[in-house]
Image: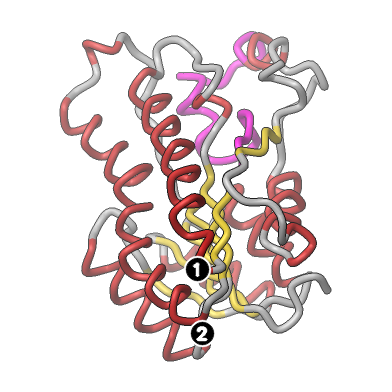
Amino acid sequence: MRLHAKTAIVTGAGSGFGAGIARKFAAEGARVCVADINEDAARAIAQEIDAIEMPVDVSQSASVRALAHAALEAFGRIDILVNNAGITHLPGAMEAIEEDEFDRVLAVNAKSVYLTARAFVPVMKAAGTGAILNVSSTAAISPRPNLSWYNASKGWVLTATKSMAVELAPHGVRVNAILPVAGETPLLQSFMGQDTPEIRAKFLATIPLGRFSTPEDMGNAAAFLCSDEASMITGVGLEVDGGRCI
């Protein structure tokens, strides 16, 4: 019960890594808000773990503000924020990615961290405590070809994490990131372009431990970084990658 009585918001928690994080937080005693653009998916996870669900489009300031208002109404305070929602573009030459795809990837993966900071950081500053966890990617430090703008967006998240950590440390707010390798999530096929045994084998060959990451892996890492056990850790990008970045 490392997160007993803490309140947590997890974006993109209706599936994949976000669902794994939400499940682990609930198991560790947190009151969880499952926030997702897919309301049905959010509702299913929330019912499973006895949490509350809220709709959010993390790329839209009005939607993020509404989430913050509703969460504060429900919880009274916000102890933990996990910026997990993310998307990618399909693999392709950097110059062939359409502008609207580029804009959407940056809006969901990068601008969302800015928007949630505007909505939640003042609350944490006022409380003098808080933990923010941004979900970056191994792509931030060991990018794969043909995913250039996704890679860049996750590099932005890692740099933002370190900058946020330095600025917010005097206010008692810690900011860390986890860097997953490709995992069994809805985004996997998008990363690979197509899901075939041959392409899976090629991806797995780059991971020394020989398997994809799982939502449970991310939940375990996130629970530690957002718990009081990690009270001296801030500005860290933790690679949860089976050795991919070695």
Q: Position of residue 81 (x, y in %)?
A: 52, 64
The number of numbered discs placed on residues in the rendered structure image is: 2
Specify few, some or many for label 1: CA neighbours under 10 Å numbering under 14, 14-19, or 20 or more: some
Left or right: where does residue 109 sit relative to residue 143? left
Left or right: where does residue 237 sit relative to residue 72? right
Please identify, in this view, whether the residue under mark 2 or under mark 1 is nearer the observer: 1
Q: Nearer the viewer, residue 147 or 72?
A: 72
Specify few, some or many for label 2: CA neighbours under 10 Å numbering under 14, 14-19, or 20 or more: some
Magenta stretch? 177-199
Q: Position of residue 118 (x, y in %)?
A: 31, 65
Q: Nearer the viewer, residue 47 or 103?
A: 103
Which residue is identified by label 2? Answer: 77
Residue 136's label in the rendered image is: none
Left or right: where does residue 229 sit relative to residue 203? right
Residue type, numbered disc 1 = His
Classify 171 as above or below 219.
below
